[in-house]
Image (cartoon, grey):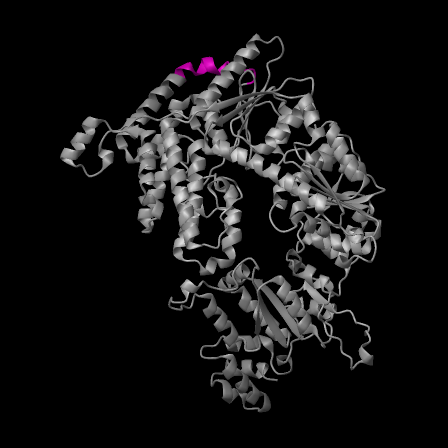
Amino acid sequence: MAGALLEFETEMFLSLFGCDGLLVAAEGMGIDRILLQFMRVYSEQDSLVLLLNTSTPEQEYFTEQLRVEGVTHLPRTVTSDVQSAERYSVYTQGGVLFVTSRILVVDFLTDRIPAHLISGILVHRAHKIIESCQEAFILRLFRQKNKTGFIKAFTDKATSFSSGFCQVERVMRNLFVRKLYLWPRFQASVTAALDRHKAEVVELHVSLTPAMRAIQSSILDIMSACLKELKRYNPTLEAEDLSLENMLGNAFEKTIRHYLDPLWHQLGAKTKALVQDLKVLKVLLLYLTQYDCVTFLNLLESLRSSQKIFGSNSGWLFLDSSTSMFVNARSRVYRIPESKKKLREEAKPASASELKRELVLEKSPKWEALTEVLQEIERENKSSEHEPGRVLICASDDRTCAQLQQYTRRGSDWLLNRLYARTIGKRDPAGAAAFELDSLNQGKDRAKNQPARASKGKNPAKKAVKSKNKASLTLTQMMGKEEKDETGVLGSSGDEDEPMEEDAEEEEQLKLDLSSDAYYGILKEPLTVIHPLKGCTDPHSLTRVLHEVEPSFVVLYDAELSFVRQLEIYKASRPGKPLRVYFLIYGGSTEEQKYLTALSKEKKAFEHLIREKATMVIPEEREGREDTNLDLARNLEPANASTNTHKAGGQEQPKVPSRVIVDMREFRSELPSLLHRRGLDIEPVTLEVGDYILTPDVCVERKSISDLIGSLQSGRLYTQCLSMTRYYRKPVLLIEFDPAKPFSLMARSDFHHEISSNDITSKLTLLTLHFPRLRILWCPSPHATADLFLELKLGRPEPDAAAAQAVTGESDTVAESADLYNPGPYDFLLKMPGSSQFGLTPWLNVAADSNESRLLVLSTSCSAPLVEVAAR
């Protein structure tokens, strides 16, 4: 399926194969093809190569491609399903291995993996390799134990290196590579190879309707006003990043979060409301060009009604531009005749729904352009002497694909009327009733013509089309979703993704063995397949469809940079076969501006990398093949560390390696890596009590803020603290904050509220009252935690892994209270009404020294044996 490498791809492969380094290619330029070529080379028993930072769908895709090409020693996946005793034999069999980061760290620390036999490591998505991530920890452990293996890294996100100080140099330092290979789209060999076999491109600049253009201007005016307010309330924000042009890009939310997250607890309600408003307005811009007029109006009406329901009003709703936006949005869907307006003024009915609306239902201009394109393709196929060319239509997401499918099957009038009846028409009973009657008549007509239509097509059967039943969400839930999902169901009419019962008999089977999990097929002559550009669980879904369908015509309903590049490589790898690409885009719209901004940002990012590469100073020992690389040193002491001259005149004393026992589940965090970097030996063990054992007496339970809130609400933290206080003399609860977030449990604005029992601080207070020996440590970041652990271990004995692993919920080895009380009856007595730890301890002490325990507890006969058992 992938085919042979192109000339520039071969050059990319050979340059990285000859010398380790970081390969940065333009987005969509086939970085997966290069990685697949490396996997093909090392898929043999004589080499052991580890591939990091890949997802499960990517692993399945790579394995499938190698199987198709006839590779016998296919890559294998090492997960938690493979027992620890079996993993060594898997490693020694060689080949390419997909290993989860947590398992690989543990196997390196326990020497379960033969590090000296590893040929090298391939790193996917190298732009994510920061110092504290698990993959950086793996590379450091690998280079400490193996000085000869290779490290080759790949990424196609050049824009990730454009922010921050010397970002690419820091990533290369974490990767232990010296070479940087840059392959932008404007590179000479890339341009020459792709221009030699160019696809025929037809650009269709669709014009916005006057109402759409007016709505777009209104939204942009409101966004500008919100940005000015945001800068006025926060003068320290960078003016360049918070521009209207940058706001149209996908990274705007990350930029806002980067600046405001550390100060979020200090911001007022006005600033937080403005940030939320900007997110809503950005979604409105997307809906304007992406979906139909009914869906856009339904979103607007839901915004206004939600403001009334919740009793909070956003400031932009009262601007003149907002009024203009609502008026134009309604004019695209319906209008009220002048005679009806006069009647309303005279009679003053209770609601506007009592007036009959005249439906306008403005068609999306792209729909008409798509119809013209499909008609042109059909005419060309009829006049062609060859086999009719297949058609691939690519739209942004599942919802757009579903709408396009219904539009091509039923037409715009049916689709818009159906949407209206299910959303806005519910508030207009007359309009809904008219639509139901019309649908009934159309259904009868279809029933009459059904036998004739069923004879069409070679294989009439039910067609397999993906349909998702999405639950309806409130506006708060909609806006709270991840930004990558924000195009999914906001303002959803609940219509596009529902299976149409009346279509069930008309649907026909697609005779395609497509492995994609999201495609919409239309069985026509020629075959037409609609596929989303984003939102699929399999990132290579569109690539599979492209190579399996092998279309002669591709219609880009929405612009997406990486797929445009992918089409260029697809055409260059098939030089003899024709390919025509129709590019539909709204001229002079934010959609066009967003696409051009993405192109400009990537070009500037590569220019920045080229300049940085020219001035970069890289030490010879960067690769870590010698012991002179300080990044591999573990006993890092500060430069101002003092020397004790009382011991042997200040001579360096031999240091005994210090050890920390770490629970296996903690390797998802960055703290074990930081502890190892500071010279502590990490011993991974499955612990039932605690997360970190620093000394035989000190047990630490680490909690992030989100985990702390969840465990306090579920009561899990009480059980964990009870076990720690029972089995260790010095139990510690460590509360660790995110360094990018404020070092505070609650905002300053919440201090004036009355304290309730449901507050986090109230629950923590009750926890300390119930466990007097429990110590709570507050750390602003994992780095501070690592320094604190070093301080806590100074001059104290080392923990025993076997003893720590032996401590379980049923263990008899308890600390301090083990010599006094039996824990079972002791817990039971603590649950008795009126009893507490402060009152029960002296009570049991007296009972232990006297034979009068029956009289000291209760006069009832059932309680006396319990205290006799509890008191030893």
The overriding secondary structure of the stretch rendered in magenta is: helix
Residue at 51 percent of width and 27 percent of height: 557
Tell me residue 792's x, y (percent).
66, 73
In the image, residue 388 sits, relative to residue 707, either above or below, namely above
Tell me residue 93's x, y (percent).
82, 45
Q: Residue furthest left?
A: 346
In the image, residue 81 sits, relative to residue 539, either above or below, namely below
Q: Quadrant of the N terminus?
A: top right
Q: Is residue 838 left or right of residue 307?
A: right
Residue at 50 percent of width and 89 percent of height: 855
In the image, residue 668 sits, relative to residue 838, either above or below, namely above
Q: Residue furthest right?
A: 46
Residue at 75 percent of width and 57 percent of height: 631
Q: Is residue 869 magenta?
A: no
> 683 or 576, which lies in front?
576
Q: Is residue 775 left or right of residue 586?
A: right
Residue at 69 percent of width and 49 percent of height: 169
> 34 or 503, which lies in front?
34
Q: Is residue 505 visible?
A: no
> 295 or 9, which lies in front?
9
Q: Quadrant of the C terminus?
A: bottom right
Which span is picked out in magenta?
A: 447-459
Q: Is residue 481 left or right of residue 691?
A: left
Residue 728 lies in quadrant: bottom right
Q: Is residue 790 left or right of residue 289?
A: right
Tell me residue 502's x, y (percent).
42, 25
Tell me residue 836's x, y (percent).
49, 79
